[in-house]
Amino acid sequence: MHQRKNTTLIQSLLLATLLSNILIVSACSAESSNAPVLSNQSTPAETYDLGLAYYEGNSVPEDDNKAFELFEKAANQGYAPAKHYLGIMYYEGLGVDQNYQKAFEWVKQAANQGDSDAQFDLGVMYHEGIAVKQDDFKKFEWFQKSANQGDSDAQYRIGIMYYEGSGVEQDYQKAMEWYVLAADNGSFDAQNNIGNFYEYGYGVTQDYDKAFEWYTKAADQGLDVAQLNIGGLYENGYGVSQDYDIAFEWYKKAADQGNQEASNRIGRLVMNGKIDDEGIVIYSIQETGLTLGDIENMSQ
């Protein structure tokens, strides 16, 4: 689901203003509670904003029950973002018993009102078959509605669908178009996939320099798969001078994030005598630490 529990500085300032301008503390309950309450003149948007504050624990203590109550109030007044978050809370079972059917109903209402996050989440629900029959065509339809409003996650998912031929005819060029849109909106997964297209020549002329450029954009944001891919370019000398030590450094960045393939490649470099194994530790999926020296001894 499309949960975004991050609040920008501007949002924080707006919320602080909201809390100071529209919230009042009941004098008769001041001794028992310091929790703010909305005035009778509060708009659905203000009710939603306070619900979001309780949901995220921003400026007020995190309280799922209070968040649900406020989202429900705003949703019943027709406010689409509140309907979406009400759906999220039913989906996750936060502040209410988990109920996928109600989650679907609320998310769909918000999506039909044009809420792009809800449209994306509805696509996810059709993808997962949550409270509704799995349907790639419906998934594509709702992802596209969200993507057309600029949602980078939806744009990225559409790129995947064109790449895989899921719900649409496989088309690498259209996949690239959607990846570029998502990448320009900051999706590092899309940036990595563009690098992959250039490395292997999917729908474009193979270009290792461009592959390196796009992998670097994603790797600089910490994406382990992109770090792995840059390591691969250096190990094989694709578009860069072959350098096993630099390959190791990139593999290590990915391995430190738990990327098992990166650990495997480090092991391969050592076993083939490409780098010195002194002090290097790798980890398996089972999280059992073995030095590369241990592995060498086991293989003898």
Image (spheres, rainbow, N blue to C red):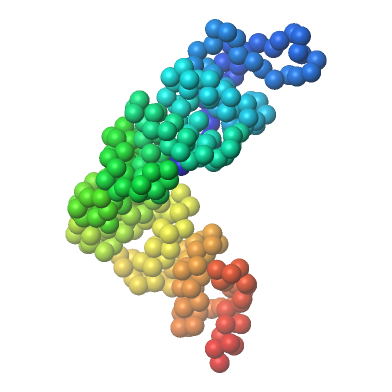
Viewed as shown, does residue 37 lie left or right of 199?
Answer: right
> Residue at point 31% right, 68% down?
238
Task: Answer whether residue 101 is visible to the viewer in this image.
Answer: yes
Residue 54 visible (yes or no): no
For residue 237, above or below residue 15: below
What residue do we see at 46% from left, 77% from top?
Answer: 269
State the image coordinates of residue 31 (x, y, percent, origin top left).
80, 15
Q: Position of residue 190 (x, y in %)?
A: 35, 49
- Give residue 233's quadrant in the image: bottom left
Query: What count of labels does the image hold?
Result: 0
In which quadrant of the rendered view does residue 299 lie?
Answer: bottom right
Q: Furthest residue to the right? A: 31
153 up-or-down from 12: above or below: below
Instruction: Tell me where residue 276 appears, x and y as whole percent.
Output: 54, 78
Q: Is residue 197 above or below residue 270?
A: above
Instruction: Using the image as rendered, state which of residue 24 and residue 18 is in the foreground.
Output: 24
Q: Position of residue 109 (x, y in %)?
A: 39, 28
Residue 124 relative to residue 177: left or right: right
- Residue visible at 50% across and 67% down in the picture: 260
User: Residue at (61%, 76%) from the top-left corner?
Assistant: 290
Quadrant position of the C terminus in the picture: bottom right
